[in-house]
Image (cartoon, helix red, strand yellow):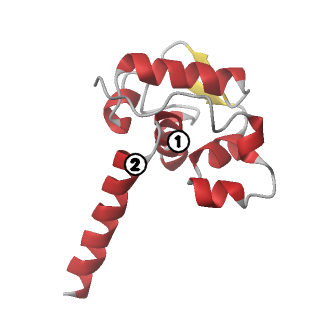
Amino acid sequence: MDQVLVALEEVTVRLEGMLYQDALRRVARVLHQHADLFFSDAPVLTRRHLPMLVGTSREMTGRVIRILESNGVVLRVGRYFRLLDPEGLAAAAEPDDERSQSVDGGAQNGASGGGPTEDRGA
């Protein structure tokens, strides 16, 4: 029974994360959680997989990736990504309450505010 409750809580946390986070944080969170699959020497996941994993449209995901690129966090290389700033990606993936307490000032480097929010068209 305890395992079922733990699994239910994990699913609830994931759903809340997808429902209530802005698009920038959702993309950053997925990239951060699956960094080994996106940024390895032989990546398994490509740019085409990201919108499906995040739950946003390709257009919104593309806008977010351009923001992350302009902030020097990731770089698009063909169908794949190169991670330039792991700490910046982690800061962009943090929830607001953790981000505001962050020592490195992740919210000040463009990781929040002014960027794309919920993708309501997808």
Please tell me which residue is depicted at 31% across the width and 71% down the height of the picture: 9
Instruction: Estimate the x, y position of residue 88 in percent, counting from the top left.
Output: 71, 41
The 10 Å Cα crowd at callout 2, few under 14, some 14 to 19, many 20 or more, is few
Please tell me which residue is depicted at 81% across the width and 52% down the height of the picture: 104
Instruction: Estimate the x, y position of residue 94 in percent, counting from the top left.
Output: 59, 52
- Residue position marked by numbered label 1 in the rendering: 25
Residue 20 - label: 2
Q: Are marks 2 and 1 in contact (CB under 8 Å)?
A: no
Q: Nearer the viewer, residue 107 or 92?
A: 107
Q: Nearer the viewer, residue 20 or 65?
A: 20
Q: Secondary structure at mark 1?
A: helix
Instruction: Estimate the x, y position of residue 4 in percent, counting from the top left.
Output: 21, 78
Q: Quadrant of the N terminus?
A: bottom left
Please tell me which residue is depicted at 72% across the width and 61% down the height of the picture: 101
Viewer can see residue 75: no
View extreme (right): residue: 104
Instruction: Estimate the x, y position of residue 112 in percent, counting from the top left.
Output: 63, 39
In this rendering, would 16 be left or right of 111? left
Q: Nearer the viewer, residue 2 or 40?
A: 2
